[in-house]
Image: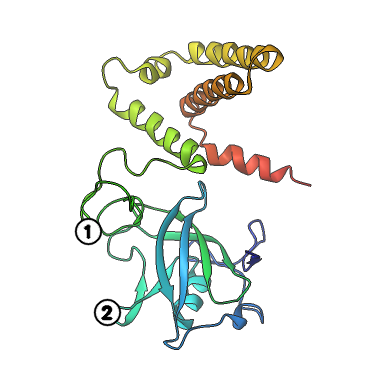
Amino acid sequence: MAEVLLAIEGKKSATLGGVPRLPAMTDETGSIRFDESGLVPCVVQDWRTGEVLTLAYMDEEALGRTRETGEAHFFSRSRGELWHKGRTSGNVQRVRQLRYDCDCDALVALVEPAGPACHTGERSCFYRDLDGSADPAPDSPPVTGEPVPAAHEALAALERTVTDRESERPPGSYTAELLDDPARIGAKVREEAGEVTRAADAESAERVAEEAADVLYHLTVLLRSRDVPLAAVMEALNGRRR
């Protein structure tokens, strides 16, 4: 689906109360096609990981307030009123970029969430698998291990697990042991890097993938030990695009 950027990261903008303000409305943003109820669906994704957080709706006022304040505003269909996400809970969503689709009738908001997106307390509203074993009733709790992370969610899930191990320090945790010994983490990254290069020289593609996974795991632990988020690495990669 062709997407047109409404806000470009890196463009200088004014601030409102310390929150970056998105660029002013343009003719392009004015071309958004609202439905017969004056609404447009907005898929909310995590700016850092790409994970889908929720689906909400905006009317013209909500879109305008979102762009003016830099924080997500929606229209509550159940209450029939403007809704500033996180105003009472503190779980605001700082909008880094807005995109709209080829038909101009749907939005994607890329956000930095300050907390859970779902009113149930789950990180994402999409925490159940339609073919899974969770209770299908609204607001029912998740089932451990469901849904299985998609490929693009793997690194984000790994980073959260490593962070949990750092704070919880469960007995027997290899990750916690590594975090207690920074020099060992560096040694393991070098060791695993050597193993993946040797696998690339003489072993199957499956073995290369397995060894590469070991590198990514140990590199994630190393980054956690230095308090460097994976998002910072991805930003550095994006900064090198030509």
Q: Where residue 26 appears, x then y in whole percent?
A: 65, 79
Q: Nearer the viewer, residue 53 or 88?
A: 53
Q: How many numbered badges does the structure rendering display?
A: 2
Q: What is the number of the mark on residue 159?
A: none
The residue tagged 2 is 79
Say which element carries label 2.
Answer: loop
Q: In the rendered view, tell whether residue 71 sits above or below residue 210.
A: below
Q: How is the image coloured?
A: rainbow
- Circle 2 or circle 1, nearest the eye: 1
Q: In the rendered view, tell whether residue 163 sits above or below residue 112.
A: above
Q: Residue furthest right?
A: 242
Q: What is the number of the mark on residue 139?
A: 1
Q: Earlier in the sequence, mark 2 or mark 1?
A: 2
- Side of 37 where 241 appears, left or right: right
Q: Where residue 70 appears, x then y in whole percent?
A: 50, 66
Q: Where residue 14 appears, x then y in whole percent?
A: 59, 67
What's under tag 1, amino acid-wise? Asp
